[in-house]
Image: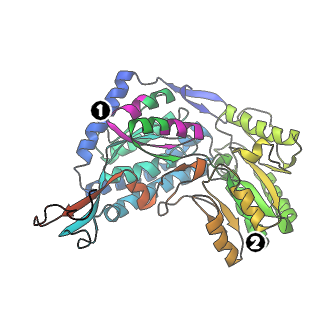
Amino acid sequence: MPIATTNPATGQVLKTYEAMSTEQLDAAIERADLAYQQLRGTTVDQRAQWMNAAADLLEADRDEIARIMTTEMGKTYVAAQAEVTKCAAACRFYADRAPAFLADEPADATAVKATRALIRYQPIGVVLAVMPWNFPLWQVMRFAAPALMAGNTGLLKHASNVPQTALLLEDVFRRAGFPEGAFTTVLVGSDAVDPILSDPRVRAATLTGSERAGRSIGQIAGRELKKTVLELGGSDPFVVMPSADLDRAAEVATTARCQNNGQSCIAAKRFIVHTDVFDAFAEKFAANMAALRVGDPMDSDTDVGPLASEGGRDEVHAQVRDAVDNGATVLCGGELPAGDGWYYPPTVVTDLRPEMRMWREEVFGPVAGLYRVSSYEEAIEVANGTSFGLGSNAWTRDEAEQERFATDLDAGNVFINGMTTSFPELPFGGVKNSGYGRELSALGMREFCNTKTVWVGDGAAASAGAGAHAE
């Protein structure tokens, strides 16, 4: 895939880039490693000063950064502005919280026969980040902010269709004052990931992307004995029970399905509705979806912009046509629009069955699948009947049902009476084929730390474990 900015609203190629040579890539890795040797010796207060400066730059340049993101991958300009603001907030969150997250944790010295015992969190080195195009700033920042604040350095291999955003991120951290090479963008294809992760100067990797990409990264990292965090796909359930506020549920369902033009791993995709309220919800939901305005993503009145690529749009339409050809019913949308750009209308499909692709696959576009169930137990069976386990939603005002959903939904995130989203304050990640490890919160920072045991004795005993255990 060429490294290029192609405007999905027009299909026009605006700017192309040459991939780095082997020598240029080696030099970038060397800069990142040298920067790590410098950054690890700085204080958390110094890093916080630089991270707050990065937040200032993001806020000052918000509109231009948003314009670049919209031009490269088609999200609405309003959504892009909000993404920049969220990234600045994450920078400030980790600048403020890193001292507590990285503070030594005292252990019970008496229990381990020590005069002093503690847990210390220290950086591990250069971390490779392989990132997707759908949230080109936020996906990177939720790794970069905690990693840099911990004292690691980052090597970014971004998606090939968002090169300007990738280079912008490097520039922001450089201008903020971080050492040269602390955050480095490498313009390379996916074939370069193996040699990068195999390099002994690179100590870990984080990836947000497809199952296929996750398996590839995991295989390389396993061979090289390197830590990974994987955030992969999702086919999130959105369960609506009889006690739900249907108007509010249908309103949030529309946003949850069509946020980012429907191109989000944690977008609600499978709408599982109790038969007692199915018809009423379906009517409200389809009406809301049909009312969304599809058009120029730079227009503030646009609700849904184009999909990021022509191939992505073709895949979404193929999934819808497969369902229709096998007996599904389209309540709204489902037809390719005429004209330039890779647009697809908000679509609701019902009467789905297991043999249809939509039943078992993630649909990465503004297409909702509607499922009728007759009980709580059936709702859980359908919700968990997928290989994914990233986010999930349940709508019920019954407190007992709320508690059951929180326990029974097989996902990394459960949101009840609200839309799944990510917050710096809460850990984010999935189970099953949606990956492993966590981003955000203190857990996300510590994923790429050496959690070090420190044991101090008075020297009187022969060893810390004398008379206890051999290991």
For the residues labelled 1 and 2, the Cα–Cα distance comes to 56 Å
Q: Is residue 253 visible?
A: no
Q: Is residue 88 left or right of residue 462?
A: right
Rendered image: mark on residue 74: none
For residue 165, above or below residue 284: above
Q: Amino acid at mark 2?
A: Asp
Q: Which region of the structure is painted magenta?
A: 195-218
Describe residue 162's horizontal placement relative to residue 118 as left or right.
Answer: right
- In the rendered image, residue 435, in percent from the top left (x then y), is placed at 54, 48
- Outermost residue on the bottom side: it is 399
Q: In percent of the image, x 77 and y 39: which residue is there?
A: 319
| Residue at the image position 76 percent from the left and 51 percent from the top | 368
Marks 1/2 in contact by CB < 8 Å: the verdict is no
Q: Is residue 90 visible?
A: yes
Around disc 2, counting alpha carbons within 10 Å, would you say few (fewer than 14), some (14 to 19), or many (20 or more)?
Answer: some
Q: Residues within 10 Å of mark 1 (few under 14, many from 20)?
A: some
Circle 1: element type: helix
Q: Which residue is mark 2?
A: 245
**Residue tagged 1:** 30
Q: Amino acid at mark 1?
A: Glu
